[in-house]
Amino acid sequence: MRSTPGSANSAGFDVVIVGAGIAGLQMLYRVRELGLTVRAFEAGSDVGGTWYWNGYPGARCDVESLEYSYQFSEELQQEWEWTERFATQPEILRYLNHVADRFDLRRDIQFNTRVEALTYDEDAGRWTVRTAAGDETTARFAVMATGCLSSANVPAFAGLDTFAGEIYHTGRWPHHDVDFTGKRVGVIGTGSSGIQSIPVVAEQAAELYVFQRTAAYSLPAGNHPLDPAEQAAIKADYAGFRARNNRMPSAGNSRFPANPASIFDATPDEREAAFDFRWARGGPGLLGTYGDIMVNKDANDIAAEYVREKIRQIVKDPELAARLSPEQVLGCKRICLDTNYYETFNRPNVHLVDVAAAPIERLTPTGIRTRAGEYELDAVIFATGFDAMTGALLSIDIRGRADLTLREKWSAGPRTYLGLGVPGFPNLFTISGPGSPSVLTNMMVSIHQHVNWIGECIQYLRDNEIVSIEATLEAEQAWVIHVNEVADTTLYPQCNSWYLGANIPGKTRVFMPLVGFPAYLDKCAEVAANGYEGFDLTRDRRLASCD
Ligand SMILES: Cc1cc2nc3c(=O)[nH]c(=O)nc-3n(C[C@H](O)[C@H](O)[C@H](O)COP(=O)(O)OP(=O)(O)OC[C@H]3O[C@@H](n4cnc5c(N)ncnc54)[C@H](O)[C@@H]3O)c2cc1C
């Protein structure tokens, strides 16, 4: 029943996957292992997802390369050689292309194809998938590998269409060289993408204006070429390394775990030395200097003040340093890693524009006008992030039982069971869905876990002649309460972060990811071991075979 991509198959597929990023590629590989027919649809013209779309200057992973990689094939993880501690976007994209080639994945992927609608036919027990071109196909199972950070957020500034210069979004970067040499460039936004791109753009641009609404905390990445001996040591026992990372709250960093001790049991000198050590080592480890930094506001204040002091030491102009110093809880917005971010503000061609004090009023044909003045620009870069976690899913018209739409179902915020299933939407799985650890982890690992869980689930359904699986409302309700209760034991909900949807005007504020990977891993395994507890399973002999 396998067909070549290019047109929808009227006979349909066992599984349809939406998205060909890290998750879609691995899911495709897994479905093929099960011997099922599959078609993946991808809006972009090639594989890679995040790493295909985000080719902005300075784009880089903030999880170490040896951890941010697939583990489903021992041969793959042995043969691929990473070159840097934190891989660049081009290197990750090369890796994902290698994976697509090595496992011949492209033949089941239809590129340049945006899925517009998914409709569940209750009688047939199948999903109808409609693309933006109007083609339709059907599948028993739909796996949404649409990404947590794939729906680019462009604020609706007045005059956007009137700007005569170049406009870019970091999450929709063109696939050709962009050269800012000699240009006046504006970067809007100082989240992770802004912080990575600003130092690189500053080296090219004649003048760089950074439009900052909220200062973000950034820690030095401490990037460096990978030592071949270090790589070889990990490869000697990759399975053991992966297993140790699985027991870490963020599904990674087992070589440098958080210190469980309280900050209040350490003297000021001990704290300083501990922070200095982690700052110098680079990476996100500073948040784990003590066990209470992410759960106790007083502990967090001490760590936050340490970072602010570092900013004061790096940025020569004290007034500028103060404007670059965040006030919010350290780490409750995604922590950024940088290479020379604060240092860049010592350059004479870099200017910080405070748009909290004087907001952007509009784009004009020649630049950006804020309440305080006008900035003449040749290019504007939106580093304004994403409609995170739900944006890509809700941009598709997904209709489940009784024509229930996902948009209605989630009108008061996303509700799932395990971040994998939604009541009313049988046989539809969400990879890294809201309610799963997703963006609070090394996503390579959480995607791996979801793909395997879904693969095993589909296998179980086949083995037991079950035609449909659907999360129950009771399980969903209990899970939503659980996710909130866990979040409330931490400081995460205390900022206006994209974890809460606070960066999108009008979006309901719900803390979307689940804090803590190991307990989640165990819970998913337990659910599966108990015959998919919390899900309704339907047997129907008429529809019993997937083949
Ligand atoms: C700049 C940046 C840096 C990041 N750095 C890290 C990091 O250091 N560590 C980490 O763990 N995570 C990081 N992430 C998160 C990153 O998104 C994940 O690590 C991972 O790449 C997600 O893979 P995915 O396949 O789930 O989603 P994506 O890579 O987002 O892929 C989803 C794909 O689905 C496609 N798609 C969506 N909707 C449709 C539709 N309707 N029809 C057809 N196709 C569709 C998209 O075009 C996209 O290609 C980063 C994200 C960004 C944006």
Image (cartoon, rainbow, N blue to C red):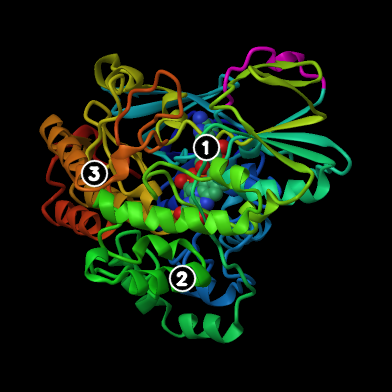
Q: Position of residue 25 (x, y in %)?
A: 51, 51
Magenta region's main secondary structure? loop
Q: Amino acid at mark 2?
A: Asp
The circle on residue 150 is 1
Asked whether 37 or 245 is in front, the reply is: 245
Residue at x 25% of width, y 15% of height: 402
> Residue 162: within the magenta?
yes
Q: Which residue is mark 3?
A: 487
Give the mark nearest the N terminus, 1 or 2: 1
Residue under circle 2? Answer: 276
- Highlighted range, magenta: 154-164
Tell me if the residue at label 1 has its CB under 8 Å from ligand 1: yes
Q: CA distance from mark 3 to mark 1?
A: 24 Å
Q: CA distance from mark 1 to mark 2?
A: 35 Å
Q: Give how far across and how far down residue 358 sits, in percent.
A: 59, 22
Q: Residues within 10 Å of mark 1 (few under 14, many from 20)?
A: many
Q: What secondary structure is marked by label 1?
A: loop
Earlier sequence position, callout 3 versus callout 1: 1
